[in-house]
Amino acid sequence: MKFSAILCGCGAMSKGWLRAIASNPDLAQSISIVGLVDLNRATAESLAKEFGLEGAVIGSDLAEVIAATKANLVFDIVVPAARYNVVSTALKAGCHVLSEKPMATSLAEGAALIDLAAEAGKVHAIIQNRRFISGIRRLRRFVESGVIGELTGIHCDFFLGPHFGGFREEMDNVLLLDMAIHTFDAARFVANKAPLAVYCVEKNPVGSWYKHGASADAIFEFADDVVFTYRGSWCAEGKRTSWESQWRITGSKGMLTWDGEETFEAAVAGNEPGLLPGFTPIEVPGPEHDEETHGHASVIASFIDAIRTGKRPETESRDNIRSLAMVLGAIESAKTRKRIEISA
């Protein structure tokens, strides 16, 4: 089955999508980019030249490009403020949609898009690419194995100092909305628990080159008495963590740590006499399915498979709105300085 796709938003992030499609033989054969949409025509033309897409229709109006190309897919890579209009236009025009995160700027918008997708009978999913990496898949598999007993806590640290320039440095709630959502979504996936409530403190530290909200500390309550904590900063100079955060997962019988890169260490309680019984190291197996570990390519493949088979994609909007609710709940908590219940 061949798909005709429009890339809406032709900035730097779009290149990762195009490279992911090219890296997967099935995707490269199945997806044809027939349209490029961007408010800046020169940006779209530059992308077309770089990736050999000179035959694509270029325009600034998504509805017009859909009509001209008869596309059946839209890849939404626009800034969050433009997302609702882009996705609703695409769904109403009969296109399946795969969106960048966050899926919307409010829960009301997210719910409206879910309803639109249902009414149109189209697949609407979110490219939460960071749950589709080997490390996160290994964490989920290990937790599900029960080796460390019942899950009790997930604790993540994220400290980097990237100087992006551009729209991020002008965003409100930049860490929570643009980056922390990756870790929030991954933690929800690893725990396989519903988020229930959050308390968050958000700051823009001295020396920050962002307009607002470059650091945040959040405590989430998940179902079954599981706690997820997040400590993060996007203006942390010096020795950094991984982009995937550093993880510590605790269970009733032991714990697992992951540095966000290559190092996994797991152990259960030992049998040494005295105050501390020591520990017994445990092997952390690799991911169960390699095809689920290729980031963007794996998400796009899951999206295409859902269209072909009718299966619900892992990151469909009906599920992903819970990750959005975690972010928006954390933002509301930071503003009100109160514990916020999460109801999505």
Image (spheres, helix red, strand yellow):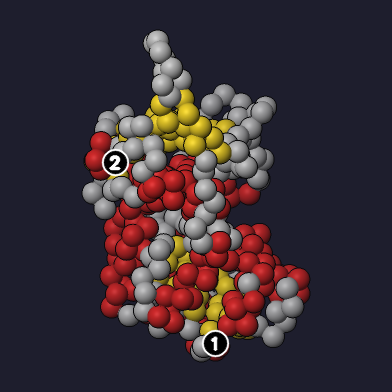
The x, y position of residue 322, in whole percent, is 33, 53
Report the front residue among 59 and 131: 131
Q: CA distance from mark 2 to mark 1?
A: 41 Å
**Residue at image point 36% right, 43% down:** 146
Q: Quadrant of residue 97?
A: bottom left
* SS at mark 2 in the image: strand
Query: In this rendering, would 241 be left or right of 279?
Result: right
User: How many residues crowd around disc 1 within 10 Å: few (fewer than 14), some, or many (20 or more)?
Assistant: few
Q: Is residue 275 above or below residue 266?
A: above
Q: Is residue 248 above or below residue 323?
A: above
Q: Amino acid at mark 1?
A: Lys
Q: Quadrant of residue 35?
A: bottom right
Nearer the N terminus, badge 2 or badge 1?
A: 1
Report the front residue among 299 and 336: 299
Residue located beneath label 1 in the image? 2
Residue located beneath label 2 in the image? 222
- Extreme top residue here? 274
Q: Amino acid at mark 2?
A: Phe
